[in-house]
Image: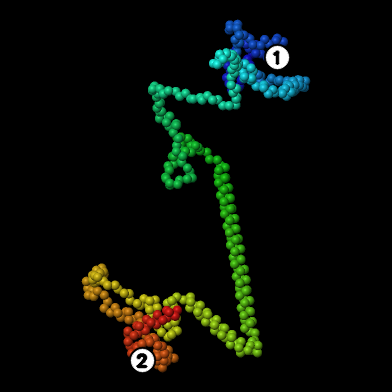
């Protein structure tokens, strides 16, 4: 009878054990009342060498999975407990001796005795002495004093043994095709924007075979999933649109409420002002000094408003306002400071060469006789305009009184008439220039 194998996954042994060995390894239940002889020795083998088989190395529980081992009884447990307790009590009662450690030859009294004689030089007497030689007591915890040096193998001049291996076997075309792994092609990402063939996309898809003839089966649930996703997306978009519309209407309502509230406040303030205007003023309560103070206060407020308005104007606008207040008409270029002709430095070359060169690029340049305009000074003279006194209220006497009252030049000849001042172009230029400088200083 063969024993159970070690595992069901292992094949049965090729060589079965002898019947004598098999019978020796049978359990006592199978053998009946015959006693187990133990290890059986083969008569063909020398004495003392047991006959061992593979079944001897299998654990007992692996030999028979249905084997049941009875549990120890209470009496066996009690006996084992008493024996263990007695052994531990014996160990605890025996106190360890202080000199239980193996002593050296010096502590045990062992050693070598040497007898030697000495002779005194003066008395010529010999004295014998006995000396006991023992080994030096060494500390067991002290590290070893012997230095161990690593023995390095001497270099050898033998060449390195080559590694012999068989030649590389060349793969056939079919084998290379089987080992070929197609490059991964993503169906979602293409950052470089390459045009990828459909064959390469199909080659990486595991649903197709290598020849590309098999058509993958599409599950019907995929269509249902797609429709469900589209429907959910449309519902979500509709909800977002409704919420946005509700927020927009709420914002418009808030704006309308604010406008109504502001309109109501404006109407209340307007009615309050009208009510105050309609109330009759009791002139008896106000005396003449209060009216004068109120008038001065109003004039001062108007003056401060006018000064604030002038301070916000630019320099050109401020000069224009001052000139208009004085009854003078000043050109824009004088206000902006562009009427002053630029000073041309000394030219060390003939500027006509440049003007002629620049004029040749213009069509009809050979027909031009002059390099520049003939009456260029007239354009500069037009910048300074005489004062204009227009209006029916400005008669000759008023004009004469205004011009004689303003003393613009301290060194002016008193005999000079007004007509000469107006007709003199040089005097008119200097007058306008000093007026502009005076107005700038005032600002």
Q: Residue at x 42, y 77 (%)?
A: 316
**Which quarter of the figure is the N terminus placed in?**
top right
Quarter-of-image position of residue 370: bottom left
Locate residue 145, reporting x and y percent. Answer: 54, 25
Q: Helix or strand or loop: what does disc 2 sit on?
A: loop
In the picture of the structure, the residue carrying the numbered disc 2 is 414
Foreground of the two, 236 or 430: 430
Task: Please count the marks in the image.
Answer: 2
Disc 2/disc 1 C-alpha distance (Å): 165 Å
In the picture of the structure, the residue carrying the numbered disc 1 is 29
User: Going by the picture, which residue comes out furthest to the top?
Assistant: 43
Where 168 sits versus 289, above or below?
Answer: above
Q: Is residue 286 left or right of residue 434?
A: right
Quarter-of-image position of residue 139: top right
Q: Is residue 385 left or right of residue 282?
A: left
User: Going by the picture, which residue comes out furthest to the bottom?
Assistant: 397
Q: Is residue 410 left or right of residue 18?
A: left
Q: Is residue 21 visible?
A: yes
Where 424 sits versus 113, above or below?
Answer: below
Locate residue 110, reporting x and y percent. Answer: 62, 16
Q: Residue at x 55, y 46 (%)?
A: 226
Q: Residue at x 44, y 23 (%)?
A: 153
């Amino acid at each position: 009878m063969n024993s159970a194998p070690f595992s069901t996954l292992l094949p049965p042994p090729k060589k079965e054990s002898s019947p004598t060995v098999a019978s020796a390894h049978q359990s006592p239940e199978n053998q009946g009342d015959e006693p187990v002889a133990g290890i059986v020795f083969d008569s063909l083998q020398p004495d003392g060498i047991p006959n061992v088989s593979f079944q001897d190395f299998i654990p007992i529980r692996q030999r028979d999975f249905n084997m049941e081992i009875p549990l120890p009884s209470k009496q066996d447990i009690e006996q084992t407990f008493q024996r263990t307790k007695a052994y531990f009590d014996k160990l605890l009662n025996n106190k360890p001796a202080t000199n239980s450690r193996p002593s050296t030859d010096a502590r045990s009294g062992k050693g070598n005795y040497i007898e030697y004689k000495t002779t005194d030089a003066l008395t010529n007497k010999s004295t014998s002495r006995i000396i006991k030689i023992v080994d030096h007591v060494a500390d067991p915890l002290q590290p070893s004093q012997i230095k161990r040096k690593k023995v390095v193998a001497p270099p050898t001049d033998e060449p390195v043994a080559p590694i012999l291996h068989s030649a590389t076997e060349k793969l056939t075309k079919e084998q290379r095709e089987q080992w070929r792994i197609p490059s991964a092609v993503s169906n979602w990402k293409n950052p470089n924007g390459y045009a990828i063939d459909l064959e390469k996309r199909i080659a990486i898809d595991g649903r197709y075979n290598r020849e590309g003839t098999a058509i993958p089966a599409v599950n019907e649930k995929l269509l249902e999933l797609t429709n469900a996703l589209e429907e959910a997306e449309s519902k979500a978009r509709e909800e977002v649109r409704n919420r946005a519309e509700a927020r927009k209407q709420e914002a418009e309502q808030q704006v309308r409420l604010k406008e109504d509230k502001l309109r109501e406040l404006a109407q209340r303030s307007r009615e309050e002002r009208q009510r105050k205007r309609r109330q009759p003023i009791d002139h008896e309560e106000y005396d003449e000094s209060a009216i004068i103070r109120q008038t001065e206060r109003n004039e001062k407020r108007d003056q401060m408003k006018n000064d604030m308005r002038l301070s916000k104007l630019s320099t050109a606008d401020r000069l224009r306002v001052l000139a208009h207040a004085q009854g003078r008409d000043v050109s824009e270029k004088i206000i902006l400071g562009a009427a002053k002709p630029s000073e041309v430095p000394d030219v060390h070359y003939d500027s006509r060469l440049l003007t002629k060169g620049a004029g040749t690029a213009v069509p009809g340049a050979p027909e031009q006789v002059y390099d520049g305009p003939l009456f260029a000074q007239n354009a500069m003279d037009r910048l300074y305009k005489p004062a204009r006194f227009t209006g029916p209220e400005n008669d000759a006497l008023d004009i004469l009184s205004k011009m004689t009252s303003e003393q613009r030049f301290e060194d002016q000849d008193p005999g000079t008439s007004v007509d000469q001042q107006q007709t003199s172009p040089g005097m008119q230029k200097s007058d306008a220039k000093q007026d502009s400088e005076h107005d700038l200083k005032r600002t």
